[in-house]
Image (tube, rainbow, N blue to C red):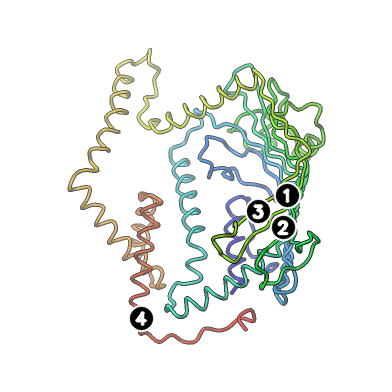
Amino acid sequence: MLEGLVANLLNRFLGMYVKNFNAQQLNVGIWNGDVKLRNLELRREALDQLHLPVNVVEGHLGSLTMSIPWTNLRGKPVRINIEDVFLLAAPKEDAEYDEEEEARRKHSVKMEKLENAELLKERNSEGLSQEEQKKSQSFTESMTTAIVDNLQVSIRNIHIRYEDTIAAPGHPFALGLTLKEFSAVSTDENWRPSFIQSSSGTTHKLAVLGELAFYWNTDATLFGTGKGSDVGADAQKTDRGLLIDKFKQAIEDSKNQQYMLKPVSGRAALELDKTGKVERPKVKARLLFNELGFVLDDDQYRDALMMVDLFHYFIRHQEYKKYQPDSTPKEDPKAWLRFAFTAVHSKIQERNRKWTWGYMRERRDDRLRYIELFKKKKKEEKLAAAETSELDKLERRLTYEDLRFWRSLARNQLRKENVGVKKAPAKQTWTQW
């Protein structure tokens, strides 16, 4: 059960960020307890969940390794090592706006968020009686606690960089977050690395931070073109290997960076209380940093204002782009006057429509139909082509909040329909013994 859950979580997470991700290769590694992924490319849409008008023009994940001792999860820690994560982003250009592409990316983000939010709940409780749900929940919580208590994480060489030649013409700038090293291990009460038993009422974690920094280089020499339409190293007029070398060098080179947050190193000792007693704090932390230095100069402030203004313009302009005429205001002033009127009127019309009986009837019909189709899908009944198309259209049109709520209603109905129905005994995995 846990093997499938972990595989599903990682497949979803990596599928969101990694280009041409091979889920089958990952599944084999997870079942063997040893996952090794190297030299992966990051997707152009990797930052879409931030809802900012930027594209990932080049991304690299050097190494992701996981060691999962399935045969002894209560006696050995799970280890995760991540190395060499480099990401180069740049602003989208107004000229490259594609309504269908933007709608597809927006829908993809919505569905990924929805599936991720429901993943644990669905696998643990769907189709089970209340007694079965309690048993499954108790087992899952026990194993999850043992894994989290003893999880060991090591991260090295992270560099996320944004370059821009559009926001402030004539003043190209680059900003970035760098991290040389981060690690976290479980310890005993004397802060010595050890394995935590589930009977312990307190979990001790010791974290080490090595050179976390944030820079904003004004009038900078860029790695690429600073334009989000140029996706890939070739389009950025550079070699991919050379670009990766530049990312690595920038982590080490502190002389040529204009830091807003100077490199920070330190330790954190955390005590996590698991007893649930109200008189005890849930988290106690002791932090020790060598130095915390913050700097902001006039040029950085100028570029920050220009970047925020560019983002605001693009987001607002994108909303009304479909109404914009192809001609310039000078060529066809009447068309631009109609554009201004349509942009304002469409917002007022949509706001007023939500208070009509027709809109409320449409919402009711959508809810009933979506619940009906979603139940058929979860019961693995074959959907007709028209039903599949209708379900897809509903999921594209409805908001995340609507889909989340209506799916929960559908699952509640499925549980009620399954009451009193005898199910064949499920096959037990070795982790359930």
> What is the C-alpha distance between the residues marked 1 and 2?
8 Å
Of badges 4 and 3, the one in the foreground is 3
Image quarter where the C terminus lies is bottom right
Nearest to N terminus: mark 4 or mark 2: 2
Circle 2/circle 3 CB separation < 8 Å: no
Disc 4 target residue = 419
> What is the C-alpha distance between the residues marked 4 and 2?
44 Å
Residue 386: horizontal and vertical position, in percent?
33, 61
Residue 69: horizontal and vertical position, in percent?
73, 71
Disc 2 target residue = 205
Horizontal side, residue 189 vs residue 2: left or right: right
Disc 1 target residue = 268
| Amino acid marked by disc 4 | Val
| Amino acid marked by disc 3 | Lys
Q: Is residue 145 visible?
A: yes
Residue 223 against residue 120 in the figure, above or below? above
**Callout 1: few (<14), some (14-19), or many (20+) C-alpha neighbours within 10 Å?**
some
Q: Which mark is residue 284?
A: 3
Residue 351: horizontal and vertical position, in percent?
27, 38
Residue 262: horizontal and vertical position, in percent?
74, 32
Circle 4/circle 3 CB separation < 8 Å: no
